[in-house]
Amino acid sequence: MKRETAALITIIGALTLAAPSIARAVTVHNIKSTRHDSKMIEIAIAPLESRSNARAGIEFAKVVSFDLKFSGYFDPSEDLAAALKSAERDKARGSIDFASWRKLTSHFLLKGAIETDPGKRGKVTLSASIYNVGNGANLFRKRYTGYQEQLRLMAHMVSDDILDRFTGEKGVATTRIAYTSRLDRGKDLFMIDYDGANRQRLTNDRSLVLFPAFSQRKNQILFTSYTRRNPDLYLLDLISRERSVVSKKLGLNTTGEFDPVGDRIVFSLSYRGNSEIYIVNADGSGARKITQARSIETSPTFSPDGRSIAFTSDRNGSPQIYVMRDDGSDVRRMTHTGRYNESPTWSPTGDYIAFSSLGDGNFDIAMIDATDLDRDRARPLIHLTNQPGNDESPSFSPRGRHIVFSSNRSGTKQLYLMNRSGANQTQLTSSSGGAFSPSWGGSILDALTE
Amino acid sequence: MRLFELSSAARWTTLVMATMALTLAGACSKKAKVEAEQDVGADNPDASAPPFVEAQMELENIYFDYNEAMIREEAKAVLAAHAEWLKANENVQLQIEGHCDERGTEEYNLALGELRANAVKDYLVSMGVNSDRIYTISYGEELPVDPEHNEAAWAKNRRAQFSVTYQ
């Protein structure tokens, strides 16, 4: 475990972004208008030119195609056979035959090459360029260096750079998602890339591991484990792979979540049987109780400014969403319709709280407006899913444009992705042990360049 | 067994410390603060016992209504019998597991299972069983006895389950 970690850091350290100024020097024309009319940006993605590894070139095209399509702004050409043929023609000619690419896209073409670095074993340089197929203008060019095994990560970096270049938005292509999956009688903690690749098992507790929550600032995951028989709250550092105890009081120590800065952890702790919300410093010191009720209080989530907390409480009979200040004052009920509303998560943009809502028959993902908290006003439920089966445990992507959630609509519980509007619902996992309680984390690059 | 000895010891230490703290607090009128700290409860004694304890003596389960932790009338007779048996067997430690059906979120059900386990504990204590002999734990909806998705299965899964160990 230790050795792998050390290797990973070295690899990331070796990844360098080169020469963004090249792209900036090129006139970027027609891009803003493309974005603002509701039409999608068409793009053909050529397999990478590679002297030694044709399969890597095709994998690159598939990764970038998924990323760009997922962003919601691009409509990548899916005709891989035609792209291969056009790429072959370019190679034979020694120049780009834009006429042949225009059959696949009316807007842009992504071309690239991968070369092994003769000086450094295992190292590769990937170069990517985007052309306007109408006039052949080069709109973007960038080089990435890393190790051969990091091809997928480099492809994701290309995707996010393209998204940034064309829309000004930061993408999610290098982010990861933590979740739990069943093994034997228990559950363990897993992590995957946002596109479902690179599944890693993070715990081997032979017990129950529940409710992972990524820190957006630090490369850490909070979770509850029964490994010492009691459900205790732990913190796992993804770089050192070391685990520390945050809270291990007899009873439940569950549903931990970091504040946006990463200094405090809010969680649910039961003593004498009744769950209340507590805040504790990130090192586990200074636990303080901030709710006091005879009912169940659980699933706390910080607002992005760290000043408010949303949580589930059944103080009025059925579980509903409430909001309070981070000192426990000014408690307000936020949901009034729906039989049960549970497991809130605050959007990173602050404007919405998403949660699991039981209407007639099954749970859907819904959200409410979370602005103007001081004002008591109607906050109608906005339903994002409406499928047979139970949709639960929503978690926003780092910038709030997407949501991951769990659903048993296919029979077993698996993870699904969607836009914040509820559009483009896509199944992410097909795990034999199911997939539960997803938490969407930050970019692997942000985490490792700290 | 070892776990329960540790557990009792931890609770005893906490009790002694709390009593001392309260005595001191009385002198300098900081009682409220001391109580707030005490309210966090005792630490998990970190026993490395297997996570799923197998029952050595079958004590009959009791069952709950949907989204309720109240002890049903028919369960009271079952618990009365358990209490008598526990009082007659002083060397026995009892673990009460609270379980839920699959409806509702995992988070909420874990809290509900905790309420159920503690409702059972309180009932047994009211019948004269020493609370130091009882350990509660919630498994929420994680360990169903019946994996089906219908009312018959849910009714079986909304339960308190018992396991006993001998000192």
Image (cartoon, coloured by chain):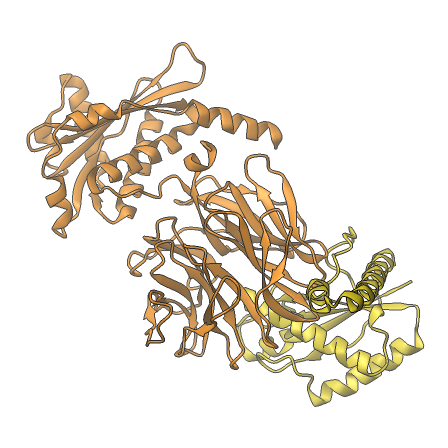
Chain colours: A orange, B yellow
The residue lying toward the viewer, choosing from B68 and A198, is B68
Toward the top, the furthest residue is: A119
* Residue in view at x 36 percent, y 65 percent: A370
Q: Is residue A30 above or below residue A100?
A: below
Q: Residue most toward the bottom?
A: B73
Residue in the image at 44% along x and 18% along y: A122
Is A68 located above or below residue A99 in the figure? below
Q: How many marks?
A: 0
Quarter in which the N terminus of chain B is drawn: bottom right
Residue B142 against residue A110 in the figure, above or below = below
Quadrant of res B8:
bottom right
Q: Position of residue A235 (x, y in %)?
A: 60, 47
- Residue A348, percent across and down? 38, 53
**Quarter placement of the C terminus of chain B:** bottom right
Which residue is at the front of the view, A89 or A415?
Answer: A415
Q: Position of residue A35 (x, y in %)?
A: 15, 46
Q: Residue furthest front?
A: B28
In the image: residue A293, left or right of residue A153: right
Determine whether, in the image, residue B7 is placed left or right of residue B148.
Answer: right
Q: Quadrant of residue A26?
A: top left
